[in-house]
Image (spheres, grey):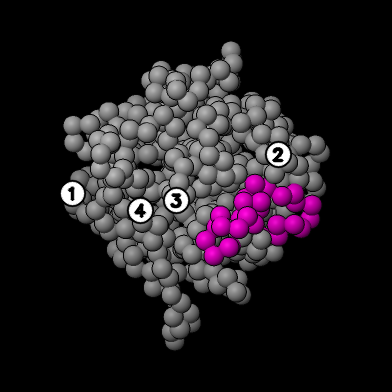
Amino acid sequence: MSIIEQSTTQASPDYRDAGLTFPDSFIFGSATASYQIEGAFDEDGRGPSIWDTFSHTPGKIWNGDTGDVASGHYHRLEEDLDMMVTLGLQAYRFSIAWSRIQPTGRGPANQAGLDFYGRLIDGLIARGISPIVTLYHWDLPQALEDEGGWTNRATAYAFADYAAILGAAFGDRVDTWTTLNEPWCSAYLGYGSGSHAPGRTDGAEALTAVHHLNLAHGLAILALKPLVTNDPDFSITLNLHVLRGEGETGPEAVRQIDALANRVFLGPLLTGAYPADVFEDTKDVTDWAFILPGDTEIIHQPLEVLGVNYYSTTLVRLWDGAAPRQNADGHKDVGASPWPGADRVEFLAQPGPYTEMGWNIEPAGLEELLVALHEEFPAQPLMVTENGAAFADTVVQTEDGPRVHDVDRTDYLRRHFTAAHRALARGVDLRGYQVWSLMDNFEWGYGYSKRFGIVHVDYDTLVRTPKDSARWYAALVATRTLPAV
């Protein structure tokens, strides 16, 4: 029976399918980010990043948590690599800390930083695990932020120099180079709402950061290509918003947010042009004079894979100006808006169930997103580079040792892998799926209060305990067939 026939005959309305088989070429893996897991924040020449500064600023992170120790990955590298083998991972998506390579974001490479990531990459390859390297997962060197950060065009060129250092060091061994993770968050949460580092709250700065991040992506690929020797894939990862509109004003609200959240990245990346309506919508915020001739040509580089991060959907309509404006956009609300020029849009709460992040659980949204991307860009291969869920976890002692019975997370993954399989059955060129996250970690503004990992981390002892979701995932990877929960 073909994949399409299986998907059609076994489809359940709640996405709780079982027995679906993924193609042999489909890549199963898991993902992390440097600041969230490494720790060793001031060791071996690493310089401070904006997240070091932000997390040490009182009132910015729940419980006053910082990433100083995080999950201790820097000192537990071999243990974590062996753990990946026990899960059968075929790929591991991780990010490199820019300030571990260039402590100030400029200048010669810090050899100790290169050595650490060299051990990681070589350790993966020795274990038969494909390295997927993300150059930037939000931890900008603080010295560059002091010069303007992503509002400064020079940062994009510094990023290209950093990429060249990595290309020269690892250009014979990395299978996939991902330039940026979720530039939407870097720009809008970092410079618009202030809920992420560096904590600025200026809509014009947020839109400036959008363009300079896009530019950095193109410049990095151009810097890498002459240096790599193993024919790798080039990629970027976007957290594209799956939007639904409510009522008569829903379509207009969707259009506005789609421009800011999705098309302002997809346009220049995949078509070489920004959407005209985003300029009109934000004309009272900025004149976009920071876009210089030739920029969109630099940004528009061929992508072997487009990374897709998905967690939930977003429900919008236009605000009537009278009732209290709802702001349930799924992001930590610290007072300022991450949506410059969209003051008339309100974000509505959606029916549950929810994860611990308060995000609605909607696997249909993942299928919808993958299919929509495929229909608009049929020649563009895709990969789910993040999907997972935070739930409250408890370690229990059993006769077989410590266990974490995370039934909700396992069910979440089962339903979203079903959605991915249905997208495959509908013709989507989906190359793989990286579960977020490999282990519990520092969850940005929420500190250590939210656990996404399929492996539990005791933050006092740093002991790792694979959760039941990890065991379920290992069975999926081993058989390539979706298990029941």
Q: Earlier in the sequence, mark 2 or mark 1?
A: 1
Q: Nearer the viewer, mark 2 or mark 4?
A: 2
As shown in the figure, which amino acid type bears the numbered disc 4? Trp
| Residue at image location 50% in from the left, 58% down from the top | 446
As shown in the figure, which amino acid type bears the numbered disc 2? Asp
Q: Nearer the viewer, mark 1 or mark 4?
A: 4
* Numbered range of the magenta stretch: 38-65
> Is 359 located above or below residue 408 in the figure?
above
Image spot of residue 476 (x, y percent): 39, 59
Pointer 4 residue: 359
Looking at the image, which is closer to me, 16 or 62?
62
The answer to whether mark 2 and mark 3 are in CB contact below 8 A is: no
Pointer 2 residue: 146
Q: Give the left or right position of residue 43, taking residue 255 as reference.
A: right
Identify the mark at residue 327; answer none if there is no mark.
Answer: none
Q: Residues within 10 Å of mark 3 (few under 14, many from 20)?
A: some
Residue 273 visible (yes or no): yes
**Real-space CA distance between mark 1 and mark 4, rounded to the nearest whole angstrom:** 30 Å
**Helix, strand or loop at disc 2?**
loop
The answer to whether mark 2 and mark 1 are in CB contact below 8 A is: no
As shown in the figure, which amino acid type bears the numbered disc 1? Thr
**Helix, strand or loop at disc 3?**
loop
Looking at the image, which is closer to me, 260 or 214?
260
Q: Nearer the viewer, mark 3 or mark 4?
A: 3
Image spot of residue 232 (x, y percent): 59, 35
Q: Give the left or right position of residue 310, taking residue 235 as reference.
A: left
Image spot of residue 441 (x, y percent): 54, 61
Q: Nearer the viewer, mark 1 or mark 3?
A: 3
Magenta stretch contains residue 5? no
Q: Residues within 10 Å of mark 2 (few under 14, many from 20)?
A: few
| Residue at image location 73% in from the left, 41% down from the top | 143
